[in-house]
Amino acid sequence: MIPVPSNVRIWLATGHTDMRKGMTGLTLLVQEHLKRDPHVGDVYVFRGRRGDLLKIVWHDGLGLSLYAKRLDRGRFVWPATVGGAVALTAGQMGYMLEGIDWRNPQHTWRPTSAG
C-alpha cells in the first residue's frame, strides 16, 4: 500500500488515459485537463483503456512519485463520467487497488460455519 497521509486528497482522472505516458506526461494532464497543481501533495490516479492498469502520481513534498499497478485478473472499477476528476478517500483507494468495487464494498465470500 502507498503510505498516503490521511489529509491527502485523492483524485481519479475520469475516462481513460494513454498508459504510455510517464511522470511528466501525467503531470501535464493534471495541469492542463484537470486544472490542478500536481505539486501540492494530492494523489492523482489514471486508468488505461483496458482497465487492468493504473498509474498514480503523487508529490510528497520532497519529490514526485509514479506508481503503477496491473491486475492479473479483472478490471479496476472506474466512474462512467468523462472529463474531470472524482474524489476518493484513502479507504476507497485501498479497495480499488485490491480490485474491489470501492463504490459498494462487500464480501464476495463468506466462510461456512464449523460444525
Image (cartoon, rainbow, N blue to C red):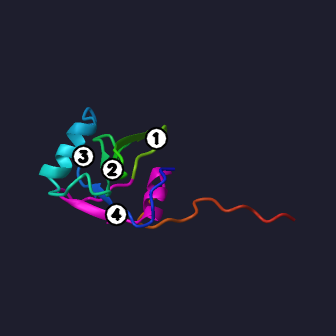
Q: Amino acid at mark 2?
A: His
59 is within the stretch colored magenta: no
Image coordinates of residue 34 in percent, x first then y, are 17, 56
The Cα–Cα distance between marks 2 and 1, rounded to whole angstroms, is 24 Å
The Cα–Cα distance between marks 3 and 2, rounded to whole angstroms, is 22 Å
Q: Is residue 111 left or right of residue 85?
A: right
- When the figure is inspected, residue 87 is found, relative to residue 23, above or below; the finding is below
The mark nearer the N terminus, 3 or 4, is 4
The Cα–Cα distance between marks 2 and 4, rounded to whole angstroms, is 12 Å
Residue 70 quadrant: top left
Q: Which residue is mark 4?
A: 9
Q: Which residue is mark 1?
A: 71
Mark nearest the camera among 3 and 4 is 4
| Label 1, residues with CA under 10 Å away: few <14, some 14-19, many ≥20 | some
Q: Which mark is residue 16?
A: 3
Residue range corresponding to the magenta coloring: 77-100
